Image (spheres, helix red, strand yellow):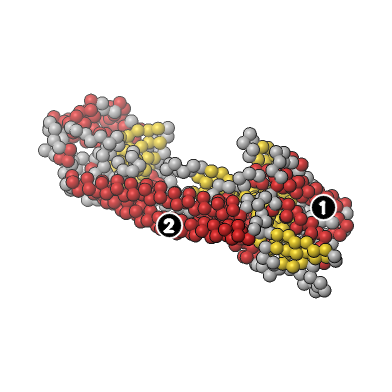
Amino acid sequence: MVISTEIEQISLPLENGNDFLKFSPLGSNPDSLDGLPQSSELPDSPPVSALYTDVNVVPEHEKNELEQSISNLEGEIVGLKLKQRSLAEKRREALNKILDIKGCIRVFCRVRPTDRRRIRQPILVESEKIVVRSPGNRKEFGLDKVFSQEASQEDVFVEVEPILRSALDGNNVCIFAYGQTGTGKTFTMEGTNDSPGIVPRALEELFRQASLDSSASFTFSMSMLEVYLGNLRDLLAAKPSGRAYQPVSRCNLNIQTDPKGLVEIEGLTEVEISNFTKASWWYTKGRRVRSTSWTNVNEASSRSHCLMRITIFRNGDASGCKAEVSKLWMVDLGGSERLLKTGATGQTLDEGRAINLSLSALGDVIAALRRKRGHVPYRNSKLTQILKDSLGDGSKVLMLVHISQCEDDVGETTCSLTFAKRARAVESTRELPADLKKQKEKRIAELEEEIRRAEEECQKVGNQIRKVEFLLSENKNLFSTTYPLLEDDGKIPTSPKEDLREILLTPPASEKATKRNVTNSLPRFMNPTMASRQRQSAAEREINGRAKMWRSGTTSSVQISGSQSFSYSDPRFKALLRNSNKKSRYGGRNTPLTDSTKCNVLDSKPSSLPRSKLVTSSDPNLKVTLGRHRRRMSDLI
Ligand SMILES: Nc1ncnc2c1ncn2[C@@H]1O[C@H](COP(=O)(O)OP(=O)(O)OP(=O)(O)O)[C@@H](O)[C@H]1O
């Protein structure tokens, strides 16, 4: 004797609470309850497979093979991910070594183009050197890189790129533009629509590199502020009410340093940026609020230091990859200026003075770092307080000094380059003999090659992972469509009689009451006979045994497990859902009842196949129809 029991309909109520979405198995007759066993007819201990007549019984060894193949593929993925992580680590170490060899503070110089015809050439530009000539004077300044007036935004950005990678690798990075007013700091950092500068390019590059790095996942957030007249102004603060962005001036933010030395600005707006478009949107908003005004030297002179912070969260994962947070600062400093030359008066004069003061504080900090003194005067200005954890040990700094090539500006140019020289000298071993320099260059080339190879290998491993993941999902699908699901707890009932006995012994508490209510409301002649009652109770008990039902809060659930005829893997069950989708309307909208919206798959072991089907509804009136006996969930619990 074999037992075959099916849930023949699952119904979900529509919005009006009266109608139901019915899921009937294709080709089944809901009225037929023939073949259900009486409990007395149960065999002593038949094999489990004998419980179900309507499934193909697949040989055990094939199942084992498939299981083995799934577990092999899972193992392969773990191995490949470990390999990928070690390659990423190798690349990261090589990049760090390069940056260490090149120096943690790098100084580039960009010369602003000029249309003015020059009688004399006060400035001579070489690839790593600038010579400033004035009557009776000649000064040479060594730099890491010099961009002549012909250099494009792209040329500059190519040199900045490696330091961005270092920020993604978990280092604090600070890129700042320094120089005399009107020499092109804002042009280099912001750029124009046709010729975007470092900030927009860096934002794009960060998202691009993060998407390529399959060894880690990243999230980014952005803040923007300006140091204006010695105070901090939040550039992204918006009015709390309303949906449209309305900037508000939020000043006097406090700077806090935690015991680990990490700097935080209290109350500073931090927006999550999930993609480049969102990041650009916020950046444009922040830029618009920045303080600028007209001076003799620059029509739209920045009257503050504008600081943009990207916080990079490198998310940890279960395979042991640690979570890390790093900061990338991109700073457009206010221009150093000779107040007489700019013709500044009143407010503009005060702004110029404030800018000069904080720039000189920045110079002092850099000088102290150079001398490796115990005390570094970070507290002398808001600018240096904010950048404290991104200027000192372990962080990477890139200073872009901007100079003019006009004869009139030779004084300022010399000042700017002297500032750059001080910064550059923080790394004491700069001016090296030629052979040492060659050795360094050779080592850098080797490390660059190492990075290239690691990246290439990483890419290959990433592709391999994707292939194996695809194979794994195919195998899992095959498994779930070929084999029946087990009980949620993974236990195979050893004896169906035992299984059913438990159900017989513990009928749902409210079941009797419900039955009483139902029968009392029916005319006498419609009351079920003894025989039909027996059939009905066997069916209901069977369904209660195969499908667990419960209610938690306002959610009713039916979990169908262990019943092959309605297991998740059963193609008929899927067909049944598909079938119902065509005609279903749920919640008054044309929302089909799909696997993902209404049916969750309980997966007790993440690596194994789904074990049972769970149908939930926030409506306590979720009904399960068994044959012609529609049961209200709340009655069955
Ligand atoms: N490399 C360049 N190529 C083309 N135009 C440039 C370049 N550098 C600067 N400019 C132009 O020079 C003008 C002044 O530049 P910018 O405002 O960037 O100077 P700044 O150093 O930021 O000045 P401030 O310190 O007063 O804010 C702008 O019109 C800018 O477009």
Q: Nearer the viewer, mark 1 or mark 2?
A: 2
Identity, as a three-letter code, of the amino acid under mark 1: Gly
Q: Mark 2 points at which residue?
A: 457
Q: Mark 1 points at which residue?
A: 352
Q: Which residue is drawn at 66% across and 46% down?
A: 391
Pick the residue in front: 373 or 618. 373
With 263 as the anchor, is 541 left or right in this view? left
Per the image, label 2 sits on a secondary structure element best described as helix
Q: Residue at x 48, y 49 (%)?
A: 89
Q: In this view, does 205 lie above or below 563?
A: below
* Visible residue check, residue 380: yes
Q: Which residue is drawn at 77% across and 72% down?
A: 115
Q: Position of residue 74 (x, y in %)?
A: 33, 47
Q: Where is residue 239 in the image (x, y as percent from the top left)?
A: 68, 46
Q: Compute the Cα span from label 1 to label 2.
A: 52 Å
With 534 as the anchor, is 490 left or right in this view? right
How many C-alpha atoms fall within 10 Å of the one at disc 2: few (<14), some, or many (≥20)?
A: some
Pick the residue in front: 268 or 259. 259
Pick the residue in front: 50 or 448. 448
Pick the residue in front: 171 or 301. 171
Q: Where is residue 444 in the image (x, y as percent from the top left)?
A: 55, 58
Q: Which numbered dot is residue 220?
A: none
Of mark 1 and mark 2, the one earlier in the sequence is 1
Identity, as a three-letter code, of the amino acid under mark 2: Glu
With 31 as the anchor, is 366 left or right in this view? right
How many C-alpha atoms fall within 10 Å of the one at disc 1: few (<14), some, or many (≥20)?
A: many
Q: Residue at x 31, y 27 (%)?
A: 510
Q: In this view, does 504 lie above or below 589?
A: above
Per the image, label 1 sits on a secondary structure element best described as helix
